[in-house]
Amino acid sequence: MQPEEHYVPVEDGFRLHAWVFRPEGVDGPVPAITMAHGFSGLKYRGLQRYAERFARAGFAVIVHDHRNFGLSGGDVRGDIDPWKQIADWRRVISYLENLPGVDAGCIGVWGTSYAGGHAMVLGATDSRIRAVVAQVPIISGYEQGLRRVPPDARATQQELFSEDERAQLRGEPPMTQLVVSLDPSVRAAYRSKDMMAFHDAFEIPEGVEHGDHVTLRSSRLAQMYEPGQWVSRIGPKPLLMVVAENDVITPADLALAAYERALEPKKLRIIRRGHFDAYLSEFEDSSSAARDWFVQHLLTRTAP
């Protein structure tokens, strides 16, 4: 399925690169789904298969890359501010509303990992969203940061954060780090073999930045991000949470506790294995659960 290429204007004069997939052989306005990847994620890493599955079920689908990544604009490459990403996503929703052939009153949001948290915030705060799917979502950046950074390394990390702030006051650019590295001598946001394997599993087209580096302050902002605080405010909009039972990136126990706080209508789909298996070995399970949820609550028009 060949997507349309779009550029969505957002604040600060930038444009986000997006794909639009449309269902074949469908007349008249159709429900739509807006999608985005997680922390430093590019849509080239696994999202096309989800979008195509949703489009074949009868939806128009838009998938964008966040500012500072891929072919999307941005003045600080690799910089991740969750609230700017959410503000940009609202512009994508506005853009989607105005696309020909889209039912603007019937839009669902699908986010994964870091963007799974964004999807919950959008579901709770944007009245245009009628159904939410949060796949392996971040719940508490603070708690996840405590688990990811060993106790003996926390003081060093905090001092680096402070030095980064001092350097920016002097007019220097933000410090950068690899997204993932197993070498303890190299500054990196994550030290995960699974994440390295996931990054290597997809070919990024020539001319597209791979998203291998992020700013150091992206990690600081991630530790301040608490999207789980919004989960109880999503209902009565329908919420599906897809949780990986052995997830060490966005821990399953935090997601399950957040699910308990969510209001009805809600549904939980637990998939096997870890965080990145949602896109790979468990794709059939994760994608069919989301498709069926959107069919139930958008195609049948039962969303509030």
Image (tube, rainbow, N blue to C red):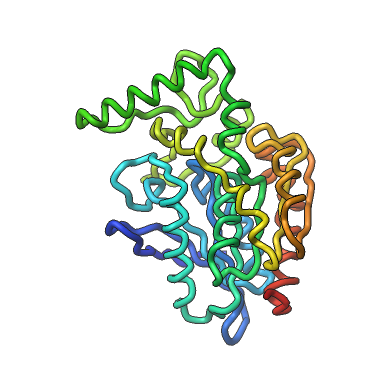
**Residue 247 in sight in this render:** yes
The picture places residue 29, in percent across and down from the top left corner, at 57, 83
- Between 92 and 195, the one lying in front of the other is 92
Q: Is residue 40 above or below residue 133?
A: above
- Between 205 and 262, the one lying in front of the other is 262
Please tell me which residue is depicted at 76% across the width and 65% down the height of the picture.
265
Please tell me which residue is depicted at 60% across the width and 36% down the height of the picture.
198
Which of the 4 quarters of the picture holds residue 263?
bottom right
The picture places residue 242, in percent across and down from the top left corner, at 72, 50
Quarter holding the N terminus?
bottom right
The picture places residue 187, in percent across and down from the top left corner, at 44, 21
Quarter holding the C terminus?
bottom right
- Between 255 and 36, the one lying in front of the other is 255
Q: In this view, does 210 lie above or below 91?
A: above
Which of the 4 quarters of the picture holds residue 61?
bottom right
Q: In this view, does 20 lie to the left or right of 251?
A: left
Please tell me which residue is depicted at 76% across the width and 63% down the height of the picture.
264
Instruction: Report the label total.
Output: 0
**Residue 48 in sight in this render:** no
Specify the farthest residue to the left.
Answer: 171
Q: Is residue 162 left or right of residue 100?
A: left
Specify the farthest residue to the bottom.
Answer: 28
Please tell me which residue is depicted at 75% across the width and 71% down the height of the picture.
296
Q: In this view, does 34 lie above or below 111?
A: below
